[in-house]
Structure formats: structure tokens, C-alpha cells
Image (cartoon, rainbow, N blue to C red):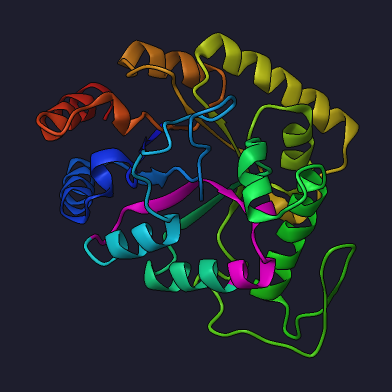
Amino acid sequence: MKIGLFGINMNFLAQPEWAAKVAIHAETLGFESLWTGEHVVLPDPRQAPSPADPQTDMLHPSTSLAYLAAVTKTLKFGTGITLIAQRNPLVLAKEISSLDVLSNGRLLFGVGAGYLHQEFAALGVDFASRGARTDEYIDVLRNMWSAEKPSFQGKYVNYDNIDAQPRPVQPKGPPVIIGGASPAAMRRTITHGNGWYGFALDVATTEKALDALKLAKARFQRPENLGEIELSVTPPKPPTKSMMEDYAALGIERLIPMLGFYKEDNILSELDKLANELL
């Protein structure tokens, strides 16, 4: 079981000195990866379905991870998740390729369609088309990362006679990990994802999500070049070894506990305890 940590760019970990301290300590302890959360904006005052207060500190994922890549050597870095329908996909392709280069190929690229309609409205992006854009934008990113002569004709994106260097260190670009447990996310995992990421799911809910993923696998054709689906989950509470074993029995390969469980005055000692329990 690979053990990551979620929320390295949020709350007091948005302070660079604390983020670096935690990243270096996590690497020393043997954690596999650090993951960011993302929202460009949050509604003020807080409204459903917003996950956080609008005053929550949250660094931009690629900026935060580029900084942490410079102070670590072996940790992998995951975006959990990047809301790609909100982005210009060519700009995003350059951004993520740059991060993969700066981290020397240590990037895990988690993506999702998004659910916070207020955020889409503020950004001027059509909320109803977010799913279709997410599918197309994944294809655009892979085209920009790996095609000898990038070219694409889609519903939302069209280009030809362009290039963008440098390409990612990882030959086909970073693995694309699909976040979410909706039917659309399950279908997208089968048709577009190298992996799947379930957030704040207990063991029972994870089992139901994996059943849904099996149904999607029976309904939709999976391209052979995507390989096996790597399964990752963030549990809704601090995990124990027994919980880890329960997730592993379901086929989960990476557990990503929340750093938000721990406070500024005890996070390093709590990571020591977590490493002792799980690693």
C-alpha cells in the first residue's frame, strides 16, 4: 500500500516554510506522495455545495508543488484534483508539463469535472458542459504532451501547426487520475484514466464505488494503452493499520490521509505516529 498525504497547499500549510518542513519530514519518513486541493475561488458568504469557508488559504497547486519539488528528491506530487474544465487546455498543458519537468517526472495528475457552480459562474465557464470539456481537454493534454506534431479538432478546441516545449519528463505525460464517484466519473475512469481517486470515502462507500466502477468497465471500452487502473482513496478520518488492511482487501493501492486532521503545533509528531502505524 502506498501512503500519500492530502492538503499540502491548504490552511497553515499554505505558508511555504511549513509546507517545506512537512514535505521534507514526510519524505524522510517514507511517505509516497503529497497531494493538493484546489478551488480558484469560493463563494462568499459560504453557500452549498462549497467545501470550505471563503477565507481558507489555498495555494495554486502547480505553484505549490513546484516549490516543494525543489526541496525534495523522491516524493511524488499529486493534484487532488485539478478542475480542468475551468482552464484553457493549452495553457494547462504547458503548466503541467513544466511541473513534470521541474519535479523530474514525479507528478501524478489528478483531474475532475468540478461541482461548485458558483466557481464556474465567476470564471465565466459554462457549468453544464464541464463533463464534455473534461473529456476533450484530457485528450488535448495528451496530444500536446506526446504528439510529434500536435493537432486537434474537437467541439471546444481546435489547433494545428503548433508545438510547445519542453515536453513532460514522463514519456506520455503524467498519469491522469480521475477523481469522483459519480457515474460520469466512473465512465471517464474507464475511457480516459490511468487511475481513480475517491475522496473522503469510508471502506463501505469505497466498496460501493468500486462496484460502480466494475459496472462502468462492463459498459464502456477501455483503450489498451491506458493500462491497469490504479486505485487511490482519501479516508474521511485518520486511518489505522486495520483500516488500511480493509481498504487493501478491496484493491485500493494508495491511501491518502488528510493533513487537515493535524494542527500546526503537533503535525510533525503526528506524522511520526502515522508513519509508525501505516508504514
Rendering quarter of residue 57: top left
Identity of the residue drawn at 45% across and 42% down: 37
Residue furthest front as drawn = 45
Q: 227 and 92: which one is in front?
A: 92
Q: Position of residue 190 (x, y in %)?
A: 76, 40
Which quarter of the rendering shows the N terminus?
top left
Which residue is pictured at 72% across the width and 35% down the height? 185
Residue 44, position as x, y percentages in the image: 49, 36
Instruction: Give the number of callouts.
Output: 0
Q: Which residues are drawn in magenta?
A: 72-93
In the figure, is residue 248 to the left or right of 32?
right
Does the rendering let one see residue 194?
no
User: Compared with residue 251, is residue 185 higher up or lower down, i.e. above or below?
Assistant: below
Whether residue 221 appears in magenta in the rendering, the answer is no
- Residue 9 is situated, as x and y percent measured from the top left of the image, at 34, 47
The x, y position of residue 238, in whole percent, is: 32, 19
At 48% across and 31% down in the image, what residue appears? 45
Q: Nearer the viewer, residue 106 or 66?
A: 66
Residue 73 falls inside the magenta stretch: yes
Pick the quarter of the image with the C terminus.
top left
On the picture, is 241 further left or further right than 234? Answer: left
What residue sits 36% from the left and 39% below the top? 55
Which residue occupies the extreme bottom position in the image? 161
Residue 13 at least partly seen: yes
Side of 53 where 124 appears, left or right: right
In this rendering, is residue 246 above or below 143?
above
